[in-house]
Image (cartoon, rainbow, N blue to C red):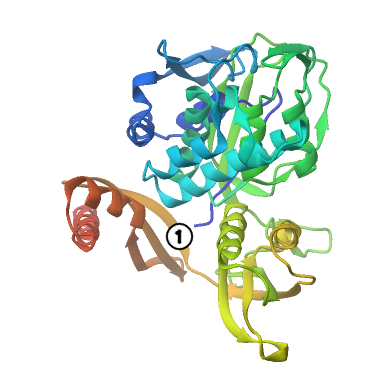
Amino acid sequence: MFQIAYLDCPTGVAGDMVVGALIHAGVPLDYLKDQLGRLKLTDSYQLRAERVSNNGQQATRFHVDLLPTDANHHHQSTSSESGHSFHRGLLDIEELIRAAQLPLKVEEMSLSIFRQLAIAEGEVHGISPERVHFHEVGAVDAIVDIVGTCLGLDWLGVDRLYCSALPTGGGTVNTDHGRLPVPTPAVLQLWAMKKVPIYSNDMNWELVTPTGAAIVTTLASAFGSPPPMTMEKIGLGAGSHLLPLPNMLRLWLGQPHQLKTVKNETVMDHGSFHQADPWVETIAVLETQLDDFSPQGIAYTMDRLLTIGALDVFTQPIGMKKSRPGILLSVVCYPETIHSCEEILFQETTTLGIRRVIQERSHLFREIETVHTPLGIVRIKVAWSQESGTRQVLNVQPEYEDCAALAMQYQRPWHTVHQLALHCWQTEQGARVT
């Protein structure tokens, strides 16, 4: 089933607040510890989470306790840019993430966040993204927050993320470049790049950190009011400042919901499910033909499109004018993300024009379940139809990344792990029935 999430940020957003909200919503801390351990940075930090009371509300505060090898300067609880001495370049961080063998979607999202931040920092300092050396966001705790956020969203099966307008905050903070006004230059640049709606709430604190800004400007499909949705779960991530408002980020999880207008017309967040046929949804197909663009550039463009929420991206070989071989690049997306996808196509490719077609597609309802195997936990994607109100499972597939990770860890063939996970799921289903 299509899962959406909304980040409500009345007191801003920082990396630790996002991870805290994800843990509060059900992401196991042990899962984060296990996956983050693949980054080979565990000798630099320890992770913990605690329940705190904030204005009478229970929330989760996430801590990255740094050992003497690093320093913590990006969480909302401190100035995000004060006196950090450990610098990592974009290429260093990309190498670190790629070597970790994280789930593919997590790797792609994490790389995109750091790339987005590098572009913003490069604009601020007048250098290329590859020459950017991160200060605070290159620190261990910031890397943990960014990758941890991507792990949590992936674990919860979030298909699309939305975010509220963001408060500007105020005052000043210490940075490696001296004392700077809030919002800091990198945060301002990220907001400008994504046209983020902002407002002042008269709080003179750094409410949106560079890490938090990078996360939401990269992963959120849209900013503003909540989308029409049926609420299923809430996660509260606590900050550390004592503020006039409860200092917490609120993560809302649920399903897209139909609304009725005064003319009794169906309105969906995605223009999505039809009332008469709930497994039919409206999609957009974008197409462009290219005969002068490199394969490497095509691969990068496809990754960017998938990261911002494209449903599918694919290419087909074609013959073009003057007998030139070329490719047809097709993007399947929801109608409200047409602009974002076209923006990437114009930025990243040599195209001068893009065709749009609005179509309908049938789909099965889907959800992610977990199964315990003798080798470890594997997520299972279960797809079903809802004929006559009865759920009929039609397709069950273990997640590739989970099977691949266990296959590598235990030196087993991938298909053996895949079959084991499927067998364990079927066994559990039989036990539930009996």
Residue 249: x percent and y percent? 62, 27
Numbered disc 1: secondary structure = strand
Q: Quadrant of the C terminus?
A: bottom left
Question: What's the residue at 35%, 24% (across, down)?
Answer: 42
Tell me if I can see residue 421 in this picture.
yes
Q: Nearer the viewer, residue 336 or 181?
A: 181
Tell me if I can see residue 6 in this picture.
no
Q: Is residue 76 left or right of residue 27?
A: right
Q: Nearer the viewer, residue 428 or 100?
A: 100
Q: Is residue 209 above or below residue 276?
A: above
Q: Is residue 137 above or below residue 172?
A: below
Residue 179: x percent and y percent? 75, 11
Q: Nearer the viewer, residue 280 or 357?
A: 357
Tag count = 1
Query: How packed is label 1: few (under 14 Cα within 10 Å), some, or many (20 or more)?
Result: some
| Mark 1 lies on residue | 366
Q: Quadrant of residue 204?
A: top right
Question: What's the residue at 76%, 59% (across, down)?
Answer: 339
Question: What's the residue at 75%, 23% (across, down)?
Answer: 184
Q: Quadrant of residue 167?
A: top right
Residue 244: x percent and y percent? 73, 11
Q: Is residue 122 above or below residue 306?
A: above
Q: Is residue 17 left or right of residue 343?
A: left
Residue 142: x percent and y percent? 53, 26
Q: Is residue 138 left or right of residue 69?
A: right
Mark 1: amino acid: Arg
Question: What's the residue at 53%, 46% (across, down)?
Answer: 109
Q: Is residue 240 left or right of residue 290?
A: left
